[in-house]
Image (cartoon, helix red, strand yellow):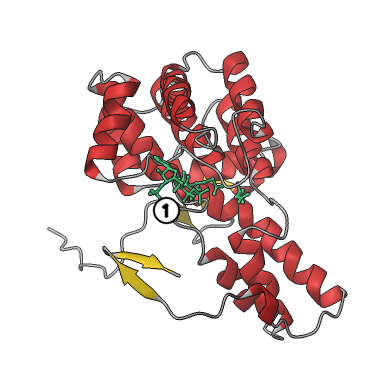
Amino acid sequence: GKVRAPTHIISTISDDRGEEPCYAGVPMSSIVEQGYGVGDVISLLWFKRSLPRYCTHFIEICIMLCADHGPCVSGAHNTIVTARAGKDLVSSLVSGLLTIGPRFGGAIDDAARYFKDAYDRGLTPYEFVESMKKKGIRVPGIGHRIKRGDNRDKRVELLQQFAHTHFPSVKYMEYAVQVETYTLSKANNLVLNVDGAIGSLFLDLLAGSGMFSKQEIDEIVGIGYLNGLFVLARSIGLIGHTFDQKRLKQPLYRHPWEDVLYTKLVFCRGKLQV
Ligand code: ACO
Ligand code: LMR
């Protein structure tokens, strides 16, 4: 019989060999003719299937809500400084993207992992939060620099409202809200943040849509697809900040001396003292 020569690359999401490119088997002409949006394209290229409209709409809302959060956040700050150092678009963009991680924007996957594990094991919010504390791990998806119990994040509310109206089940989100109720009883800044809202709601999307097997959900959560939503979304804002600085012909940034505490550092019982 025929022997297939081994290939160096295996690819399963797209194919450009025919008359027109296909995303997960769907030709580009269908994507355009059927009025697909960016949520559909993400469904095809990330999840390799067409998802129901409420799911693709949810993905699009996540992207719109996370596109930017002003010039002061870590990512935009880095991008602005880089653009003002005269660097090009790609350098300015990636300089901002590189700040996305466990503290800023990149806590979505861990939020999904920890909320799922705690909910599936039947831990009460108290047991979950206290077990994290014992391990010395901050609860991903909880806490914000400027948002408070009495000044909630509007983005979180909007995502929750959408899910309440359109999702068949919001059990993971409800669990995250119970966790927030407990953490807020400890400190007023320990709100459910946008990473935690997306992480818990995406679990509801995966589990409730009937489009994914249990094994596929474990794989998506295990590999960590969800920080990709923030990376993709925030790229829109970071590109905007780059253009803004160039348009404004902003000079090289130098941080003011007055805003730096110049001092000798002393370590006391393992903690940095000034
Ligand atoms: N879980 C448990 N305790 C917490 C948490 C948390 N998620 N966040 C803060 N605390 C407590 C801790 O006791 C902390 O003391 P420590 O420094 O001894 O650990 C105390 O609150 C004060 O913490 P700060 O560092 O002053 O809080 P800050 O306002 O600087 O941190 C941050 C905000 C980085 C978001 C933090 O809450 C955190 O790490 N959260 C988890 C990661 C996360 O979800 N990041 C995404 C934020 S949303 C976004 O970026 C789009
Ligand atoms: C963001 O979306 O960038 C934020 O929630 C982080 C912040 O510090 O506001």
Query: How far across and down, in percent of the image, does residue 130 sit?
Result: 28, 31
Regarding residue 23, the answer to whether it shows in the image is: no
Residue 238 location, quadrant: bottom right
Query: How far across and down, in percent of the image, does residue 160 sit?
Result: 59, 23
Query: How far across and down, in percent of the image, does residue 108 sit?
Result: 45, 43
Residue 194 location, quadrant: top right
Placement of the C terminus among the 4 image quadrants: bottom left
Q: Which residue is mark 1?
A: 102
Residue at x-position 29% and y-position 38%: 133
Residue at x-position 63% and y-position 22%: 162
| 243, 187: nearer the viewer | 187
Please indicate whether residue 199 sits to the left or right of residue 259 in the image. Answer: left
Regarding residue 18, the answer to whether it shows in the image is: yes
Query: How far across and down, in percent of the image, does residue 109 sit?
Result: 40, 44
| 96, 127: nearer the viewer | 127
The response on whether ligand 1 sits within 8 Å of label 1 is: yes
Few, some or many C-alpha atoms within 10 Å of disc 1 (few <14, some 14-19, many ≥20)? some
Look at label 1 and name its amino acid: Pro
How many labels were placed on the picture?
1
Residue lying furthest left in this view?
1
Looking at the image, residue 37 lies above or below residue 206 = below
Looking at the image, residue 224 lies above or below residue 210 = below
